[in-house]
Image (spheres, rainbow, N blue to C red):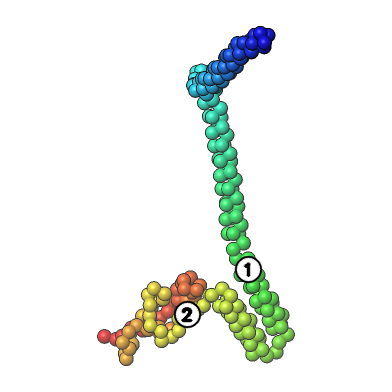
Amino acid sequence: MADEEVKQETESTEAPETQTEAKSEENANASEQAAGQEDSSEKTEAPAEEPKEPTPEEKIEQLEKENADLKDQLLRRAADFDNYRKRMIKEKQETFDYANANLLADLLESLDNFDRTVEASATATDVKTIVDGIKMVKGSLVQMLENKYGLASYAVEGDEFDPDIHEAIGRVEEEGIEKETLKQIYLKGYKLKDKVIRNAKVMVSVPKN
């Protein structure tokens, strides 16, 4: 009995000591966790380093680089513009040189027809045949110019005189008319579409006073 009581007393004495040690370990762990959180907060809240101010030499080097880049861009732009200018001059000259190429190609057929008429006239015995051939060539030429290029003649005897499109080479007083009219056509006028390219030369009849 005495031994059992001593054993119980011993166990009751050791239990509080074990509990005390466990609490001490828990407090130590909590302290470590708190310290770790504080260290983490300090690391997170540490201010970022300010950018380093470039030295005067570095600034000069950067400016020289930027200046070289801008100069290179300027030279490239100037070269591109010069090439564009030369190309435009060439195209303009080609347009001027060959502007009438289509018209001249169309006129070749009329020239061929005139050649045939001249050759035929060398052996022709009938003048009317030659005249009819020339009229046919002329009609074909006029039709081509009118239909394909918009070229048209104007000025007919009896038309009202218009100083904007008629060039009067003389005037004749005439009774029985109320306004100036074309009495005679010396040279036909021509329009290219709506633009006059040659004024008609005419004799004008004017009312007699």
Q: Depth check: give the residue in front, 157 or 89.
A: 89
Query: What is the residue that sits farthest to the left in this orientation?
Result: 209
Query: Is residue 177 something that shows in the picture?
Result: yes
Determine whether the residue tagged by mark 2 lies in a helix, strand or loop.
strand
Compared with 115, 72 (above or below) is: above
In the picture shown, does residue 140 fall above or below 74? below
Residue toward you, 109 or 102: 102
Give the amino acid type for the residue marked by disc 1 in the picture.
Asn
Residue at the disc numbered 2: 154
Seen as rendered, the residue at the extreme front is 1
Indicate the amino acid at tag 2: Tyr
Tag on residue 169? none
How crowded pointer 1 is (Cα within 10 Å; few <14, some 14-19, many 20+) is rated as few
The residue lying at 73 percent from left, 85 percent from top is 123
Q: Position of residue 13 (x, y in %)?
A: 60, 11
Left or right relative to 200: residue 29: right
x 54%, y 25%: residue? 62
**Badge 1 is on which residue?**
102
Does residue 192 appear left or right of residue 7 in this picture? Answer: left
Q: Residue sitting at 26 percent across and 85 percent down?
A: 209
Q: Position of residue 80 (x, y in %)?
A: 58, 43
Task: Say which quadrant the N terminus sits in.
Answer: top right
Nearer the observer: mark 2 or 1; the answer is 1
Expressed as whole percent of the image width and height from the top left, the position of residue 35 reads: 54, 17
Q: Position of residue 14 (x, y in %)?
A: 62, 12
The residue shown at (57%, 55%) is 92
Say above or below: 31 vs 203. Answer: above
> Badge 2: how crowded within 10 Å, few (<14), some, or many (20+)?
some
